[in-house]
Image (cartoon, grey):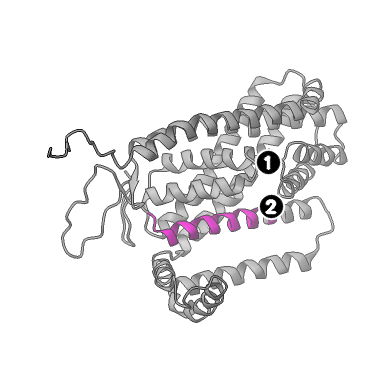
Amino acid sequence: MHAPDTTAITPEPADTAPHRTRRWLRPVVITVLLALFTTELVLGWPSLAAALSQLRAPRLNWFAVALVAEVAAMGCYARMQRRLLRSAGVIVPIQKHVALAYAAHSLSVTLPGGPAFSTHFNYQQMRRFGATPAVASWCIALSGMLSAAALAVVTAISAIASDGSLQWHSLVTLGLAVLLLTVGIRRITRHPEKVEPATRAALAKVNKLRHLPETQGLDRIRGFVEQLRTARLQPRHAVAAAVFAVLNWLLDAGCLWLCFHAISDTQISNAQLLLAFCAGMAAGTLTIIPGGLGIIDSALVLGLVTGGVATSTAIATVVLYRIISFGFIIGVGWITWLVIRRHNRREPVVHGDTPRGQAQRPRAPGRPAQREHGRVGGGPGRAR
């Protein structure tokens, strides 16, 4: 009888299967994205060619300032999110927030179902910044609400400035909704235990449909809600975030105004241009077409023409604006996404917190835990 030859049997590494999956998944994803962009270009080319035929050589000085305004608008959005995270005690360098803003925006406006991809990407990166699941979700939701409320405020201001008929009851309703939402969020973050009865009842109904025990998953929800205690929106951070949200839209509208002056010597009412901008941005939220191609452009052109701008000038203005706000910003965003993705592959996260190969350092009792990119806690700190 011969002893079995165990030396010939080599166990396969545990991560071989995931590695093989990643090996074939990457070219598939790249092929799908290239096919998607090619399809979008083919379908949108007739409208794009017609619009480009109306574009005259812009004045380079106005064009350069318009580019700076759009970059500043993206910076304001990044600073708004940074303020929200700082209010929860997560301190991250501004350049990381700016990179995240560009990459997430590109995912949102170029992919079908882009907002879902953008939200997931935002969540992943904020977890890498050191935010807990509850804080990351809170920051993403609140930044979206702040941005929408800021656009509503800018629209109301432009309607008043243009002597338009402002529906005060709609404005009051919006203000009350924002106030009640803010009070509700602050109350939940200060007293998360008050939502447990409602959470338990809803979870019991969901688990009943799934044929699971009534309390299945309750511990995870309790932990998630408990994390909201650190997500307190301090007044100074709330005011700063609201100001940055409004500046984000105003600078974006300023880019459109500068593009108009880069094309034409004629004058247009600033209030009318701002109202046309708000109408275009509102129209973009109602379409499933990536980037709002055709929808935003038509609304902007119609708004400018209504304000007394010649049709050819309006088309040229919108084309130049979209070259900056869509073409340039999206291009930078996708490059940023590739850089972030490459960096994430080099430093994968174990359990969503600690990069692989980086051990948790022991800390003294009472000292707050340190994260990869920032410090989590309510005390003062300086970004690195």
- Magenta region, residue range: 131-152
Tell me which residue sits at (57%, 31%) in the image: 68
What amino acid is found at the position of numbered circle 1 in the picture?
Ala
Relative placement, left or right, of 266 versus 83 is: right
Q: Position of residue 25 (x, y in %)?
A: 49, 34
Q: Could you tell me if residue 191 is visible in this image?
A: no
Image height check: is 34 above or below 86?
above
Q: Position of residue 303 (x, y in %)?
A: 82, 42
**Total of numbered circles in the picture?**
2
Q: Residues within 10 Å of mark 2 (few under 14, many from 20)?
A: many
Check disc 1 and report the residue beneath it: 253
Check disc 2 and report the residue beneath it: 154
The kind of secondary structure element at disc 1 is helix
Q: Does the stretch in magenta take in 133?
A: yes
Q: Which residue ends up furthest to the front in the rendered image? A: 1
Image height check: is 16 above or below 363?
above
- Spatial distance from mark 2 to mark 1, Cα to Cα? 10 Å
